[in-house]
Each structure stands twice: as structure tokens, then as C-alpha cells.
Image: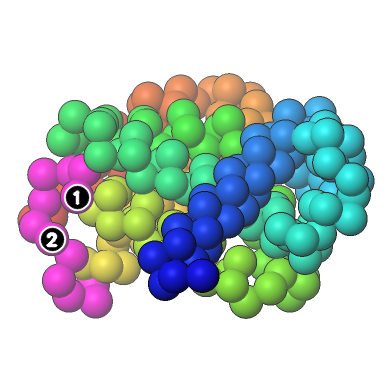
Amino acid sequence: MSDSSLARRVERRTRQRAANRGAILDAARPVATREGAGALSLRAVAAEAGYAPASVYEYFRNRAEMVLALAAEDLGQVARLLRESGGTQAGAARAMLDSLKGSGALPAAVATLESGTAPSEAERLFTGKLIAALTALSEAAPRAPPNTRDDQADVVLLAASIVGLTVFARAGRLKALGFDEQELIARLDPRFTKGS
């Protein structure tokens, strides 16, 4: 077999493996919505995807790896939305809040990371997507790039504030406390805008 045909074969196999992994993740999303990402079972995902349970384990070693993969996809979506948010910090915060409210995988990822059961590669992928989302958040607002440690801390604190608002909003606590999401997002803007 020639080197070029071997290379094509390896490339084809790599593409097929990525497509299969993507199909499994696509099947995992409705299962996670129905059962909750924290209760996701690889057996249920396999049934949804039309795969034998053992086949799913070829792509995901355990539930923790799958949960982090779903959460990483959600963080990638957050980063994309932030890049399209219109150049204001309030717009970026709103885009991030709306996206996070729809993610069941991100809260499950927190529990997964705390448990220490995720493979290190899955943790690295999740962390890379988290960094991409934080970078997109810092670029979405009209402010200087976060070059200093203090600037970077401000971006992390802004993200943490939005995540906290998301948790309260999902639980219906903002309304119970008499607050509107938009009002609180507007209050974040002067606190995290450079020069305030």
C-alpha cells in the first residue's frame, strides 16, 4: 500500500470516527434534556443513537467524559454568540445569560469536575472551551484587551456574575426577589467597564 493511500485511509477513518462521536453527542443532547445531564446514562444515549452500548464506550470512556463534551459544545456556542453580540458589554452579558440558561450540561459539568471522574483529555477540552468563552467575553465589550492579571480577573468576575444570574434566573429566584435580568445586566456594565 502506498503512503498516499494509507494517508487517505487514515484520514477517512479519522473523519468517520469524528462523525460517529458527533452523532453520539447529538443523541446525548435530547437524553440529557429528558433525564437531566447529571443523570445521563451511556446506555440511554446508545439507545437514542442506535448504537450498541459497548460501541459508545469506544468514543466516551464514561459518563463524565460525555457530560464534559456536551458542556464544551455549550461553551463553544457561548463563545460564538459572544462574538456576534454587537460589541457592548450588556449585549455580551445578555447573550451569555440566554445561552447558559438553556444549558443543562454546564451545571452537570461542575459536578463532574468536582467528582474527579473525568478523563484528563476531557477536562483539557472543557478548559480550552472555557478559555475561548472568556476570551470572547473580553473581546465582546468595547474595552482594552485583558493584558494584566487584574484585567483578566475582571473578565472572570464578570463571567461569574453572569453565571450567578443564570442560576438565579433558571431557579426563578430573580423574579421571586423582584429583579429583572435586564436591570441587573445593566448594573454589571459600569462595574466591569474599564476606567470605571
Above/below status of 113 relative to 30: below
Q: Residue at x 88, y 36 (%)?
A: 47
**Which secondary structure, mark 2?**
loop
| Camera-side residue of 139 and 67 | 67
Above/below status of 62 relative to 119: above
Give left or right: position of 111 versus 101. right
Q: Quadrant of residue 190?
A: top left
Dot 1 surroundings within 10 Å: few (below 14), some, or many (20 or more)?
many
User: In terms of sequence position, does the residue under pointer 2 or pointer 1 come before the other?
Assistant: 1
Magenta stretch in the rendered image: 139-150
For the stretch drawn in magenta, the main secondary structure is: loop
Q: Is residue 163 magenta?
A: no
Q: Residue at x 45, y 62 (%)?
A: 5
Q: Amino acid at mark 2?
A: Pro
Q: Residue furthest front?
A: 1
Res 145 label: 2
| Camera-side residue of 36 and 72 | 72
Q: Amino acid at mark 1?
A: Glu
Above/below status of 150 relative to 41: below
Q: Position of residue 128 (x, y in %)?
A: 43, 64
**Which secondary structure, mark 1?**
helix
Q: Position of residue 174 (x, y in %)?
A: 56, 29
Q: Is residue 140 magenta?
A: yes
Q: Which residue is mark 1?
A: 139
Whether tag 2 and tag 1 are in contact, CB under 8 A, the answer is yes
Q: Residue at x 24, y 76 (%)?
A: 149
